[in-house]
Image (cartoon, grey):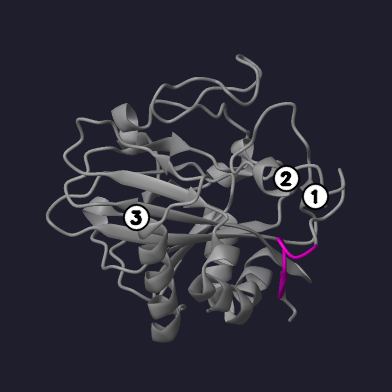
């Protein structure tokens, strides 16, 4: 990773990193994704409508349930990459997210920021979007440059557009990006296995459906730097860690996350 990559990330809130994931790591992620598809967790969500000719499924926080994902988390150098991007002395895992769109999926991932759905606050963070299949630019994640500087915008459910998180009217609404695409600096790339997109949790992003016969399998790794702390909400966040922890929640409000669910990725 070059100094230019770091500067691009900090300026735009997104950067493409070529060849940052090894072939062995891609094999691990492919194995884990296929296992998730065969046996989704109770946290899995179908994000496409019944009449969609394709299929869009997401699953969350599965890395401890699949040996291939666990090995990836134990050995990946992406913590080092995130530390450079965020100028952070430490990097901890937040969660993993599997996103799969099968061939001919029409369902678009709506424009949104990630952090308003979460229960963490702070600025030093990175999400790595890692495809295990070739992705052409027509099917790739799209990111709006500079939006990581804020403000926070209203999170809504993808299919029904409900305000299930922050109260209605408490945050500004997303602009109509699709109707005014020429007014925004939208980043997107063609990717090969081994490439990754690194983006900030406040960067506005979305994704089209999948054209043609290929599917788009993605593993996303969310990581936290020094200033990121647990911020409990009055509503159910995504992912819903309460379903994992029950009455034994290890998190402390206002403190960094730690413990076996949030391992340190840098330094090892």
> Residue 199 versus residue 10: which sits nearer the camera?
199
Q: Which residue appears at 65% of the width and 42% of the height?
A: 243
* Mark 1: secondary structure: strand
- The quadrant of the picture occupied by the C terminus is bottom right
Q: Is 263 included in the stretch rendered in magenta?
A: yes
Q: Residues within 10 Å of mark 2 (few under 14, many from 20)?
A: many
- The residue to which callout 3 is attached is 188
Q: CA distance from mark 3 to mark 2?
A: 27 Å
- The residue to which callout 2 is attached is 120
Relative to residue 254, is residue 133 depicted above or below? below
Q: How many labels, in total?
A: 3
Image position of 3 (left or right of 175): right
Relative to residue 29, is residue 247 depicted above or below? above
Res. 3 visible in picture: no
Q: Which residue appears at 77% of the width and 70% of the height?
A: 90
Res. 220 visible in picture: yes
Q: CA distance from mark 2 to mark 1?
A: 5 Å
Q: Which residues are magenta?
A: 259-265
Relative to residue 201, is residue 29 depicted above or below? below
Residue 143 in the image: state x and y as whole percent: 43, 48
* Mark 2: secondary structure: strand
């Amino acid at each position: 990773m070059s100094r230019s990559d770091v500067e691009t990330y900090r300026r735009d809130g997104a950067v493409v990193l070529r060849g940052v994931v090894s072939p062995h790591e891609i094999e691990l992620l492919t194995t884990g994704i296929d296992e998730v598809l065969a046996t989704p967790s109770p946290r899995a969500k179908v994000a496409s409508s019944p009449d969609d000719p394709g299929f869009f499924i997401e699953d969350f926080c599965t890395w401890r349930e699949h040996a291939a994902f666990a090995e990836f988390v134990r050995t990946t150098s992406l913590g080092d990459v995130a530390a450079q991007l965020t100028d952070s002395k430490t990097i901890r895992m937040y969660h993993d997210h599997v996103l799969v769109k099968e061939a001919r999926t029409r369902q678009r991932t709506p424009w949104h920021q990630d952090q308003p759905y979460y229960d963490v606050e702070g600025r030093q963070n990175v999400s790595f979007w890692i495809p295990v299949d070739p992705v052409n630019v027509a099917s790739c994640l799209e990111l709006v440059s500079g939006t990581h500087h804020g403000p926070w915008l209203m999170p809504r459910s993808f299919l029904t557009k409900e305000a299930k998180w922050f109260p209605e009217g408490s945050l500004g609404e997303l602009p109509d990006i699709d109707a005014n695409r020429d007014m925004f600096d939208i980043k997107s790339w063609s990717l090969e296995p081994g490439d990754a997109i690194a983006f900030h949790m406040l960067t506005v992003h979305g994704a089209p459906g999948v054209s043609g016969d290929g599917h788009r399998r993605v593993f996303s790794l969310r990581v936290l730097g020094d200033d990121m702390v647990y911020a409990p909400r009055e509503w159910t966040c995504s992912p819903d860690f309460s379903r994992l922890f029950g009455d034994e929640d290890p998190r402390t409000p206002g403190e960094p996350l730690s413990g076996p669910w949030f391992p340190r990725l840098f330094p090892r």
